Image: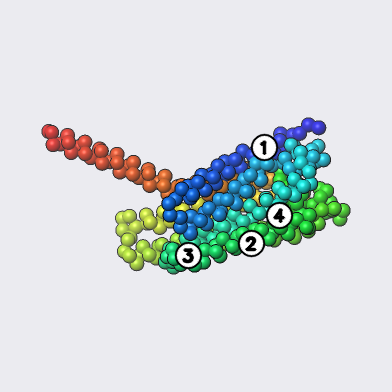
Amino acid sequence: MGFTIYQEALAILPKCTAFLSLIGSIFIIQDVIRQKTRSVSHRIMLGLSLFDCVASFVNILSTWPTPANLSESVFLASGTTLTCTVQGFFNELGNITAPIYTASLSLRYLLFVAYEWKERDFKKYELVFHAVPIIIGSTMAILGLPLQLYNNAGYLCWYAPAPKNCSEFGTCSRGELMGLFRWLHYGIVWSAIAFVTISMILLYMSVRKQERSSQLLGSDQNRMSRSVAAQAFLYVFALYITWLFTTITRVYSTVFKRTNKTTLMLMATFFPLQGFWNAFIYYRPRWIQKRNERIRYREFVRNDNINIIGYQS
């Protein structure tokens, strides 16, 4: 059977974007490991990146673990029910744990800036920053196993009914509770995203208040708050761009019992990129610092040359 360009792109595109995400997460992991002194923030970022790696690897596999008996309708499907179940398990584990870890990271920033927590304060509660995302993610992933929720769900194995479209006729042999678990999944994810959004708003407001109280306002009045706001916006943006099309696609298919091809393709493009966005945000302050150092160096050299010319004349 011949496949359309859409079906082939749906299977291949996530492999490319997920590879970028995997590389980004690996860069963060190796950078954290190389740090001589690792803070709680570093360790939270390490946990986040490890689960991003899990999610990225799942997306790289794409349709390969899908049972081969669906190969006539799913491009590159060459797995079994077992491989599909394994992919679905790690798909849920990686993709629900990562946004909750981001919420832990945003809480750490808020407590540090707005409430002036010290490193010793964070160490007292560090276990909570890791335990909450890992426990929630592991619980959701494990529950899907005995309930047989992991089946082909487009280009990945996840919460889905089997056989396809069986929900309309009540003839499902697997995944009967997939609708309930999808709503629960996205309720948790968007609660984490809302938490991050509110935390970043409070963080920015705190920075602005600190600027006013320390009389930093003037010709350069908004430099500090703009820098913090930009970093905060990027973290929120990374979550929204990762989860927006995914949520629309899954909610649409759950409610209308069919898949929207456009949103599914957008999901396949942006959903696997979470590690890539995180790496960009993680390294961004260093790039800015190095750029500013080069600018200051060029200005120094230029001014020094002007002074030499003036002295010689």
Q: Mark 4 points at which residue?
A: 251
Mark 3 or mark 1: whose residue is earlier in sequence: 1
* Percent coordinates x, y for residue 300 in the rendering: 26, 41
Hey, what amino acid is under mark 2?
Answer: Ile
| Residue 244 shows in the view | no
| Residue 124 shows in the view | yes
Hey, what amino acid is under mark 4?
Answer: Val
Of tags 3 and 4, the one toward the viewer is: 3
Of tags 1 and 2, the one toward the viewer is: 2
Hey, what amino acid is under mark 3?
Answer: Phe
Determine the CA span between mark 1 and mark 2: 32 Å
Determine the CA span between mark 2 and mark 4: 25 Å
Which circle marks residue 122 in the picture? 3
Mark 3 or mark 4: whose residue is earlier in sequence: 3
Mark 2 or mark 4: whose residue is earlier in sequence: 2
Helix, strand or loop for disc 1: helix
Q: Do the residues labelled 1 and 2 touch (CB within 8 Å)?
A: no
* Percent coordinates x, y for residue 100 in the rendering: 59, 59
Residue at the top extreme of this rendering? 2
At 81% from the left edge and 57% from the top edge, which residue is drawn? 176
Mark 2 or mark 3: whose residue is earlier in sequence: 3
Mark 4 or mark 1: whose residue is earlier in sequence: 1
Mark 2 residue crowding within 10 angstroms, few (<14) / some (14–19) / many (20+): few
- Asked which colour scheme the image uses, the reply is rainbow
Q: Name the residue under label 1.
A: 12
Of tags 2 and 4, the one toward the viewer is: 2
